[in-house]
Amino acid sequence: MIMDKKMTEIQNAIFNIIGNMKLLYKNKKIIELGQYMDEQYEILKKELSDDDQSTNSSTN
């Protein structure tokens, strides 16, 4: 049940990120698009890493 909620949160976050990327691209904000993609990648990578660590520590 908790995993379903987390997956839904992740899916919503990715949906919002893609929407923002489309807007930046449409408005020819290519440099900003690259920066935004880098920032969001790092945020998601950290969140997934934190979630993985908390999952592993709770199973030990």
Image: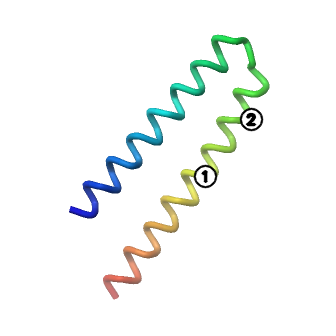
Outermost residue, left side: 1
Q: Residues within 10 Å of mark 2 (few under 14, many from 20)?
A: few
Quarter of the picture containing the N terminus is bottom left
Horizontally, residue 18 falls left or right of residue 32, namely left
Residue 33 percent location from the top left of the image: 70, 27
Q: Position of residue 41 (x, y in %)?
A: 60, 45
Q: Position of residue 17 (x, y in %)?
A: 54, 34
- Provide the secondary structure element on which disc 1 rests: helix
Residue 3 picture quarter: bottom left
Task: Classify 25 as above or below 53.
Answer: above
Q: Residue at x 61, y 18 (%)?
A: 23
The residue identified by callout 1 is 43
Q: Is residue 17 above or below residue 21?
A: below
Q: Amino acid at mark 1?
A: Ile
Q: What residue lies at 51% left-to-right and 28% top-to-bottom? A: 18
With 13 as the anchor, is 32 left or right in this view?
right
Q: Position of residue 8 (x, y in %)?
A: 32, 47
**Image quarter of the C terminus:** bottom left
Say the numbered circle drawn on residue 13: none
Question: What residue do we see at 45% from left, 66% from top?
Answer: 51
Q: CA distance from mark 1 to mark 2?
A: 12 Å
Residue, far bottom: 60
Indicate which disc, 1 or 2, sits on the residue closer to the N terminus: 2
Residue indicated by mark 2: 35
**Helix, strand, or loop for circle 2?**
helix
Task: Compare residues 37 and 9 and report the one nearer the observer.
Answer: 9
